[in-house]
Image: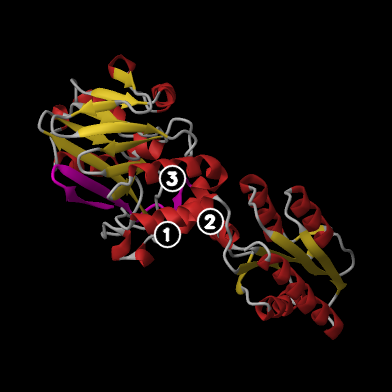
Amino acid sequence: MSWFKREIAEGVTLVRILNTKLPRFENFWPIPNGTSYNFYVVEGSEGTALIDGADYRFSKEFFEALESVVKVEDLRYVITQHTEPDHSGTLAEVMRRAEEAVLLGTKQALSIGEALADFPMDRAREVKDGDEVSLGNKTLRFVLSPMVHWPDTMLTYLVEDSILFTCDLFGSHGASDKVFYDEAPDSFELVDYYASILMPYHAMAAKAVAKTRELSPKIVAPSHGALHREIEGLLSMYERWTSWKPLKKALIVVGSQYENTARAAEAAAEGLREVGLEIVIVDSAEADPDDLLAHTLEAAAILVATSTHNGHPFLGVTFYLDLLREYRPKNKVAAVLGSFGWGGGGTRAVKKELEALAIPVVDELTFKGRPKEGDLDRARELGRRLGEEALKLL
């Protein structure tokens, strides 16, 4: 575990804790390249503010890093943009040491934080949308953005420097010492982060993106991962994601026990390629959940290829369907194919689940045992028809 600091404007310091020890974010999402926790110190002519904290498990690194920028007891304001423990876990101790500081947050943040983060309510003050606090030559304006992705979330705009601190919005994974996304885009997982954390709240995220566009910041500074200074590209990408505009892509999710279903899936992929779609094939037994969601987000077509296991879809496919049920993707078309040995039912169950999620299913192809040449021909044709329907969504 390490940290670094960087001044991103006069009197504005980014401090980033690099987490390369925990294998999963929120104890579920795999982070093979690590992740990071950003917090910010804003020093004005008449006071200093801390924006966000960090996971309490990194308290040693957090306070070591914070003290390298400012004496904790000199803080005038402590701003909680969101009370999830990876942001609020160190703030109770900050408030204990900074005896004169005022804690600022939304009404929901203070309510949640009292129980979840031991916030001292006697020194807490609610802020509303558009409220401002002055640090002398620097002004912080609060922009409420509920349900991105908790009800307590807000953004903080530093007026004079045109920096927007965005909490989880525009965040990314990756334990990198590069400050800005454009310095090393391959070091930061932006789409996986959005898909796993913010995708269920796409409508509220879209509103927050619109507020960001209205403010027209020069720097976007989230609480995880890379900062952004190429703002138009970032906003355009988020506008596409939040409005469910797919790319010219097809996702094939395979659950195949003895490669019979996988062979048919490859044939269907040929059909999809013939109509011009880019293909991503993932093995549901090995795929990380955030990758499944990220590929689903950007795909126009979804082909689920499943063998039948005890009368049900392949277990990895069942897990994928569970993800779809929670995240409810939109603007997709689908098809289903699969093999069975002594009893079917897997493809039928997948088709029923997809239709329940309002994802139109072009067709269902089921065959027994090893695929014959005629089965592979039908799979290719299924892929072509699925691709043709997907192109209508673009």
Q: Which amino acid is tagged 1? A: Glu
Q: Earlier in the sequence, mark 2 or mark 3?
A: 3
Q: How is the image coloured?
A: secondary structure
Q: Which amino acid is tagged 3? A: Val
- Determine which of the numbered discs, if any, sits on residue 290 in the image: 2
| Residue 171 horizontal/vertical position (percent) | 39, 50
Disc 1 to disc 2: CB gap under 8 Å: yes
Neighbor class of circle 1 (other Cα within 10 Å; few <14, some 14-19, many 20+) is many
Mark 1 highlights which residue? 189
Q: Earlier in the sequence, mark 1 or mark 2?
A: 1
Q: Nearer the viewer, residue 393 or 324?
A: 393
| Residue 188 horizontal/vertical position (percent) | 38, 60
Name the element at disc 2. Answer: helix
| Residue 230 horizontal/vertical position (percent) | 32, 58
**Residue at (31, 36) in percent of width and height:** 156
Q: Residue furthest top?
A: 122
**Residue at (26, 60) in percent of width and height:** 178
The residue stretch that appears in magenta: 1-27
Q: Residue furthest front?
A: 214
Mark 3 highlights which residue? 209
Disc 1 to disc 3: CB gap under 8 Å: no
* Dominant SS in magenta: strand
**Residue at (65, 55) in percent of width and height:** 331
Name the element at disc 1. Answer: loop
